[in-house]
Amino acid sequence: MGALDAVLNEAGSRFGLSSSKVTTLLSSLLYFMNEQGGGLSGLLDRFRSTGMGDTVSSWLSGGAPTANASQVEMALGRDTLGNMASKAGVSMSTAASALAFMIPRIIQRFAPGGVLPTHLPSDLSSYLTGPTAAVASTTRQAVYSAESAVKQGSFVQRFWPLLALLAVFLLGLWLLSGRRAAETAFNAEDAVRLAGQKAAAALAALKPGFAASELVNALNFDVINFASGSAQIPADNYDFLNKAAAAMKIAPAGTVIQISGHTDNSGDAATNMRLSQERADAVRDYLIKQGVDGSMLVTKGLGDTQPTGSNDTDEGRFRNRRIEFSVVH
């Protein structure tokens, strides 16, 4: 039995979901956490950015594992949640409710004493069928069913190896088609819009006396989607950067923030390095024009040396072309 099977069984019973559907939701969540980076810590940061800092602290201290569907949708994003729901074959509202039930319990199970693991624990990653899969329970269910069938007749027993190979082959085709469908459905404009909404909400949720780390966490939700080969900040990002500048002006005294520029791996590495530096400088210059003290902003171009996603997909390349904020001190 897996480490979270009891949680999955309770979630399935509570929301009327089959074992395969509820575990596919969990596997999709784990896959998302792996792809986006940050693991359990990154997932919690998403909830904190929606104003749930006190609730997250309660989870980590062993408090009531409560969350609601709207909070999950805001933390994960509507597109991501819709993708998870589609894979599991359930409605978005059902997926959000089931995940709201499971996520706090996952955190409490794998962060005893409030200490978050730096990597996805093996007991948790066991719910993934592989590096690109999100259907762990489907695999386990198939194995259990096949084993039962083997016991039921000599014919099946004789051809069990062939049936097993066929099951693995069909599962692989299903996973591949699901991945391609997700890539085809990726929409950069929607991603930018949703990122801007999350970032704006996170900035608005900052409380007086906020820490510099809370500020950069909010800033990093935004996406500045530069045109290919350009260091010109898109006009759509001005409003967010104006809000970012206002928050920086009231950051703790002595705060220094690094603005790092990143690219995907398209083109020449040296050109990418130069372009990433120009983009970081462009953001710094804009913030200074809005009244931010230049001494609190430093820049660094990193080119394509620190990808967060796969450069083999449109979405991965989009994620890699980014401006990233970090606290120097």
Image: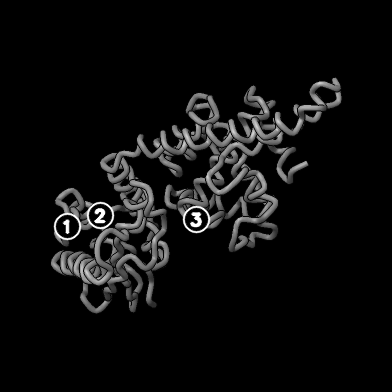
Residue 197, image x, y percentages: 31, 44
> From mark 2 to mark 3, how far is it between C-alphas?
20 Å
Counting other residues with Cα less than 10 Å from the Cα at mark 1, is it few (<14), some (14-19), or many (20 or more)?
A: some
| Earlier residue among tags 1 and 3 | 3
> From mark 1 to mark 3, how far is it between C-alphas?
27 Å
Q: What's the mark number on residue 42?
A: 3
Residue placed most toward the observer, 285 or 29: 29
| Circle 1/circle 2 CB separation < 8 Å | yes
Q: From where the camera sits, is residue 249 visible?
A: no
The quadrant in which residue 40 appears is bottom right
Residue placed most toward the observer, 139 or 164: 164
| Earlier residue among tags 2 and 3 | 3
State whether residue 227 is above or below residue 21.
below
State whether residue 162 is above or below residue 238.
above
Instruction: Name the residue carrying label 1.
Output: 233
> Residue at (31%, 59%) from the top-left corner?
264
Q: What's the mark number on residue 224?
A: 2
| Earlier residue among tags 1 and 2 | 2
> Residue at (19%, 69%) from the top-left corner?
278
> Residue at (24%, 79%) from the top-left corner?
295
Q: Is mark 1 on a helix, strand or loop?
A: loop
Residue type (three-letter) at the residue carrying disc 2: Ile
- Compared across the picture, whether 13 is left or right of 275 comes to right
> Residue at (53%, 25%) from the top-left corner?
89
- Compared across the picture, whether 179 is left or right of 10 comes to left
Residue 159, image x, y percentages: 76, 27
Counting other residues with Cα less than 10 Å from the Cα at mark 2, is it few (<14), some (14-19), or many (20 or more)?
A: many
